[in-house]
Amino acid sequence: MSIRLVQLLTTLSIFVTCNVHAFDSWEHKRMGDLAYHVAIHFYCDENTEKNVRCKEWQDENNQIKKCLTAGITTITCEIAVKARLKAVFCKSNSIVDCDTIIEKKMRQEQCKIENGESKDCTKPSYKRLLEELSYWYFDPLDIANKEITKENSLETIPKNSDKKIDESNPLLNYTTYGDVVMCVDYFLTPDKLLAGRENYLIDDTDLEEEEVKKTGRGNPYVKHGRLYPVVRRDLDINRIRCKDDPFNIEGARSGHVNHSHFQAELIVAQSSNHMLALMLRTSQNNLFGALTANAISDHYLHDSFSPGHITTWRSRLTDLAANSFHDHTNRQGLDITVNTKTINDMSKFERNSSDLLSFIEKLLCSDNAVNDYLLNAGEVGLTSDHCGKQCMLTPEQRTIQETELKDFIRQLKNPHPEEVNPKVTLKGDNSLWKSSQVKQRLLMLISQTRSILDVLESKPQKEEENPLTIVDSFQDNSWSWAYVKQSEFEKNTSTFLTTRPSQIKASIGPITYDIANSDNNVGEKEKEKISYRAMDRVIGVSLGIDNMTFGDRQNRSLLSVETVLFGKASSRRYSDNWGVLAGYQQQFSPVMNGAALTSRYVYVKPEIEMMYSAQLRAMQINRPNDSRVWKLSIGARVDIGFTSFLTTYIQMTRDYAAQTDGRIGNGISIGAGIQLASPACRIFGISNLLNCN
């Protein structure tokens, strides 16, 4: 087997494992940016002068816009940057020392940011520095609302047109709240994201000063010795790291250890990071750190709206089986119940006379960017090719969706008795902006906006008349998964080949899952039931070599294709899964080529991605005299790898092979090889044949 072939298989395995998320990365980012925009404007609506934080946010936005506007004087930006530097670096220093520190930092930043390698620091510009030292996330919708209208948005620009949005525009390329929501999938743990820049874990002030003396510049990305981020500059986030890419190794690794994105662990992760955000806001008065922790929480909140993440036994399945089940369930969709009373409670906000539902309804008419982001799939400042025609709307379709959305908002405003609460079908995996999922988008927007508002509403205690305030709209989240009674189960089924029926009940914010699980086949219309066996077909391709210890002692090359016929997982910890596989094998021998029908009984250890197999092959052996004979071969095989998508195997077989003298030799063969496996709907070409979309 050539090294190039092994490299190709490795690359392919990374490619199919990269996209293991509830939603595509662009969907996480898009919804995160939209919710942040709505939350900030709802919180500050008509209260800018009364609320210090709102005033600061408005002033900062104005400063950034002024500095990014062509022709503005350097003095304007210099004043803004000095004010921000004082707020960041002078909290623990006297006023006398502060001016010295600020002058030093200003000189360093001018060299580092404006002139790169050059020692000429006489042309100061503070655009990037002002943005990096921001307490708030950049709001791309706020800019888009004033610069991009429905008439010239990405959605309405033909692909072959000369008219294009300038993606290099600095207004569209700063770190946003949605960037953090998106990037959680690409870090091994969210703690790595919070802890800051991995390349600069130690703040070496002496080294920094020495570098400034030698080169006339320092490093603009050195973190200043803080545990949690305080300004945008503290984050180690970029869009190269946070994207689906065949060579994004850390992204593939994070997909292998993403158990906290599923089932009960998912709800715990959402709640714990949300509580961390509230703690940073109230006990440390660190608004930016709180927003960052909450963006991580909101990623898990997004995942909870993905049915595949609620129903997949992630901790009891291998990577391959978990993804196969996850993909099928996300594509099929499941129904949830919307608690209208909870929705209305979340919508209330004492600072505003209006409620959140009414505010969103108003924005649909008055804010072009919100309308574009919520209803259509074209992205402001990014590409719009993510889900093609299924997500793009004609003007007529857009009007229909606006009407449907407003009708749904009015339905939500009227609390219903529990038994008549509305039901909505949720889907995942690049389906969120399909026209059928407009209600799901609205529910996610309401929930995430409320999550951000919790952070903004919570306040540290400053004086006795200003008590500590903590607002947590997700404190009633719950999870349960129970088998039906054993006596009822045993009446009709066997416990060896089937799994006992069970019921999953989960509440996250305003939505409730109540999902029946069984081994029975479930039709497409049954959106409140799911079969344990409802998985995408898994296909494996392997390349290997059998070394004969008998006869001519020849080597035989193997190319095999397999699929899973049947399998069963166990709910017990440290227990084992099993499955039955069948396939076809082409054999290449120095004497005569042959073929085989293969089958394997596989015993699986999901915790370590290891499989033990009893193998049976019906081999067609071609003799030199053109005659053929069938032989039955038995053996044992062990597969092991970093992930079940890509494994290496060794096997020992009672084997048969044609000899140069025309005889059929038999004896023991030792084999080894490499296998790449994937759900069929992730394989290019096959997914189209199976109509996976």
Image (cartoon, grey):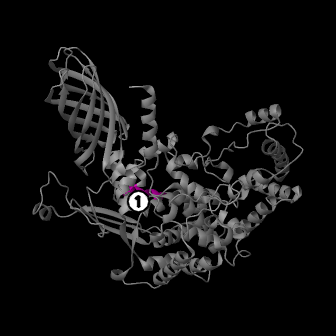
Give the percent coordinates (x, y) of residue 293: 56, 56
Q: Describe the element under mark 1 as helix, strand or loop.
A: loop
| Residue at figure coordinates x 53%, y 48% from the top left | 191
- The answer to whether any part of residue 472 appears in the image is no
Query: What residue did someone put label 1 on?
Result: 693
Whether residue 596 is situated above or below residue 592 in the rendered picture: below
Whether residue 263 is situated above or below residue 527 in the rendered picture: above
Q: Which residues are magenta?
A: 262-272
In the image, taking residue 155 as reference, residue 2 lies left or right, namely left
Give the percent coordinates (x, y) of residue 615: 20, 34
Whether residue 249 is situated above or below residue 656 in the rendered picture: below
Whether residue 22 is situated above or below residue 149 in the rendered picture: above
The residue at the far left in this view is 491
Magenta stretch: includes residue 211: no
- The secondary structure making up most of the magenta span is helix
Give the percent coordinates (x, y) of residue 467: 61, 71
In the image, taking residue 508 as reference, residue 86 lies left or right, namely right
